[in-house]
Amino acid sequence: MTDQLNSSYDVVVVGGGAAGLNGALMLARARRSVVVIDAGSPRNAPADGVHGLFAREGVPPAELLARGRDEVRGYGGQVVSGAVTGIVRDGADFAVSLADGRSVRTRRLLVASGLVDELPDIPGLRERWGHDVIHCPYCHGWEVRDRPIGVLGVGPMGIHLALLFRQWSDDVVYFAHANTPPTEEESEQLAARGIRVVSGEIAAVELSDDHITGVRLADGLVVAREILAAPSRMVARAAFLADLGLTPTAHPTGAGEYIPADATGRTEIPGVWAAGNVTDISAQVGNSAAAGAMAGAHINADLVNEETRRAVEAHRALANA
């Protein structure tokens, strides 16, 4: 089900995940005209369930989003399928263009388009992403507890991830792969926690019957594993913001790129807010939903301030007439 796109709104929300839908819910309850434009490619689509979310533990991602869309519509908001390709300033408003040629005007923007997980080009890795190739111990750790886990040494977070996953299993192997070797301090930490370090480039992830069975190195050695934790490079979906002068920034951790925003979601571009993984690359579903609610409330307050200023100007003009 998708709604008919109107010509203009108080707020256009780009992205129909937890952040976008909860932001839209707050705005719709504030009696704002709001539409969520959803490209239909949520980051957590491969996952079996959402975890760490109070009162919704284990709910399938698609079910959670369907409930969210219904709730937004229940308060008069709209949800439209489509991919936003560009946004430009048009006077005091914004003009939003979609891939299918449609366009819409809006007074404010909430960008909740999420991020893309970029993985190393290792055969077998992408195919099992979200199943037995995972990235977050808090999202998946309980489900893979006590199983043989391999942690892929890619980027700045590999060793940290290995130490974290040791909380859920005493059989953890750290594959150095293309990363620089662990420092002396890191090697001591890994050894103290009983985490084996395997050097050498990974050639492929071994699969059998749609399950990981091991990791094959370039020299032919196969290390048996059932689960592989792979830190991804997390990059904000934000190409459509380029004409506004809003471009992704390198994350301080080195783990990817994000759109900077303050605690309320306000970006450096007046009238544009951001919430969820597009601005907080480590946010889980609960964090993203909370950020969307915060941004929605502040967008409404910003609109109230604008409307109050205009009302005062009109009131003064009338009084002085």
Image (cartoon, rainbow, N blue to C red):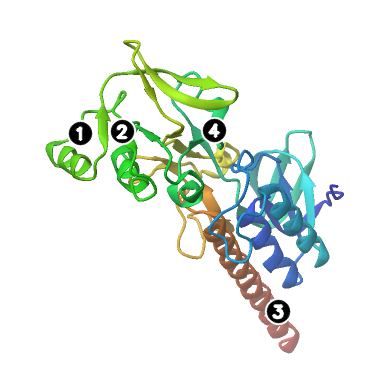
Camera-near label (3 vs 4) is 4
Q: With respect to residue 77, does 103 lie above or below?
A: above
To which residue does mark 1 refer?
A: 182
Q: How far apart are the alpha carbons under marks 3 and 4?
A: 53 Å
In the rendered image, is residue 230 in sight? yes
Nearer-N-terminus badge (2/1): 2
Residue displayed at 31% across by 10% down: 219
Q: How far apart are the alpha carbons under marks 2 and 1?
A: 10 Å
Nearer-N-terminus badge (4/1): 4
Camera-near label (3 vs 1) is 1
Q: How far apart are the alpha carbons under marks 4 and 1?
A: 26 Å
Give neighbour class at mark 4: few <14, some 14-19, many 20+ (Cα, 10 Å).
some
Could you say whether the residue bearing mark 4 is in a helix, strand or loop? Answer: loop
Q: How far apart are the alpha carbons under marks 2 and 3?
A: 63 Å
Amino acid found under the numbered disc labelled 1: Pro
Camera-near label (2 vs 1) is 2
Give neighbour class at mark 1: few <14, some 14-19, many 20+ (Cα, 10 Å).
some
To which residue does mark 2 refer?
A: 174
To which residue does mark 3 refer?
A: 311
Q: Position of residue 261 (x, y in %)?
A: 47, 56
Give neighbour class at mark 2: few <14, some 14-19, many 20+ (Cα, 10 Å).
many
**Residue 298 image-quadrant placement:** bottom right
Give neighbour class at mark 3: few <14, some 14-19, many 20+ (Cα, 10 Å).
few
To which residue does mark 4 refer?
A: 129
Nearer-N-terminus badge (2/3): 2
Q: Residue furthest left?
A: 184
Could you say whether the residue bearing mark 2 is in a helix, strand or loop? Answer: strand
